[in-house]
Image (tube, coloured by chain):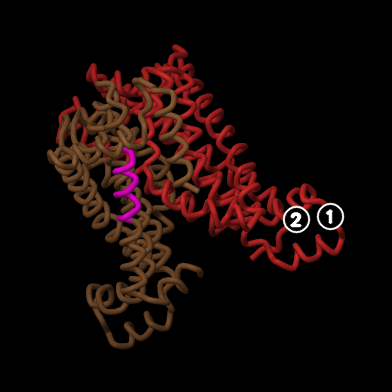
Amino acid sequence: MTVARLAWFAGSLVVGALIILGWQWIADAKLVSPVFLPGPDRAWAALVRGFASGTLEEKLFGTVERMVYGWLLASLVGIALGAVIGISAVARAYLAPMLEFLRPLPASAIIPVAIALLGLSEGMVLAVIAFGALWPMLLATIHGFAAVEPRLYEVSRALGLSRWSVIWKIALPSALPDILSGMRLGLTIALILAVVGEMLASRDGLGLWILLAARSFRAPDLFAGVIVLGLLGFVSAMILTVVEHRLLRWRATR
Amino acid sequence: MPLALVVVAEIAARSSEMTSDTLAAPTDIVLAGIRALGNGTILAATGQTLATALGGLGLGLGIGLVFGILLGIFPIADKLMEFSVEAFRPIPSVALLPIAMLVFGFGYRMEISIVAFGTMWPILILTRAAVAGIEPRLLEVSRVLGLGLLARVFKIVLPAALPRIFVAFRLAAGVALIVAVTVEIAANPLGLGYAIMSAQQSLDPALMFALLVWIGLIGWVLNWGLVWAQGRLFGRAAVVEAAQ
């Protein structure tokens, strides 16, 4: 982080502040009805109020918990399944067309099916999150395993490694960059599906909260909720970036 | 393999003589699909979904392109906007659903605005990268020729960045369909998402699964068509550019 970069970042912060000022100005001049667009001051007040009384915190934890559990479940299943499919050329040839067909299916389209099977329950929301976040990880893992340098497999055969240690010692590390980018995509999907799931199944969380705020025309609360959701997306992506840097440090920097 | 699964499901459903509110035999699903196709309900719903997805995609494409090109051409603006872009981008598009509901009520406009928001970001980010990655000599040429800003955008920048912009467009088209269906399932009484929701609520699993297959089919055809168009329009250029 050089001085110049810091200066640019400060500049971009100033521009961000100017945008917020512009928002305030539009709200104060009532160019847009205050029912729809509360000023940043009112949204901020709602934010502070929500966190002070603990309600917003509670909703936030509900959403985070749902998102993380669903995402972890999807990661485990996705990587394990992806490894099994990716390691064997036969399984790839059999399953790849079907997976390619399922991939563009919007994950949210599975929600009605999940409701029919599991009802409007916590398990339904988790299942939908896990299902939606599964695809990017599964496909990334398969792709990562398929793209392993063939010589590494030859080396492992020469060393007489077992199938298990081939996966563990060779294929998994070299597929790691693909897997991590799949996990990043999966996390975004998990957040979106957590919000949708809460809205539909009335599970306590940020998604339900902003929906109820909109229905009762509490626009400041609504904007506060959206801001928290944006922050949640931002922070979770940032944590993954840090983890990625840590895990991939052994790779030659490009 | 998928065929074998379908046959197994059929046999299982027939042999157990299942009457269920949640599952249906594959033949029933196909029949329900054909029936719904025949009386036009599926087609009407598909039209609504595609109209909103395309409308939102068009809007998002316009906004994303303009900002992406501007930020790509002027690195200063890019650096100054960095914080604002990074602050708005991670907001999940469905989080805007309640806001759009407040402002527009139910209907096309509300859905289009959300789709536009969802598609705008991938286009903006990838266009910015594509424009910033243009061979600098091309820009030098344009400077030597004394081209104005508009001429530079239309004669140099757009053609050079087009293959990668098309990749962004393809991604965004997938996002548009997903967001449209999601909005319909979550709230908006329109289109395929709503149709599948009401099939579930009226305990008609055959129709529900038929719609699910149909949505998957549309997504697949859309993706396949765009990949084909990409290969057709740009040939190897797209492949090479995308790999960079």
Q: CA distance from mark 2 to mark 1?
A: 10 Å
Q: Is residue B113 part of the magenta span, yes or no?
A: no
Q: Which chain is red?
A: A
**Image position, residue A232 (x, y; %):** 48, 33
Describe residue A222's horizontal placement relative to residue A236 as left or right. left
Judging from the image, what secondary structure is the residue with disc 2 in?
helix
Q: Which mark is residue A161?
A: 1
Q: Which residues are magenta?
A: B211-222
Image quadrant where residue A42 sits: top left
Disc with the residue nearer the chain's start (2 vs 1): 1
Judging from the image, what secondary structure is the residue with disc 1 in?
loop
Q: Are marks 2 and 1 in contact (CB under 8 Å)?
A: yes
Q: Work out whether residue B19 can be spotted.
A: yes
Q: Main secondary structure of the magenta part?
A: helix
**Image position, residue A204 (x, y; %):** 42, 17
Kind of residue sitting beneath label 2: Ile
Q: Which mark is residue B27?
A: none
Look at mark 2 in the image and give the residue it sits on.
A170
Q: Is residue B216 part of the magenta span, yes or no?
A: yes
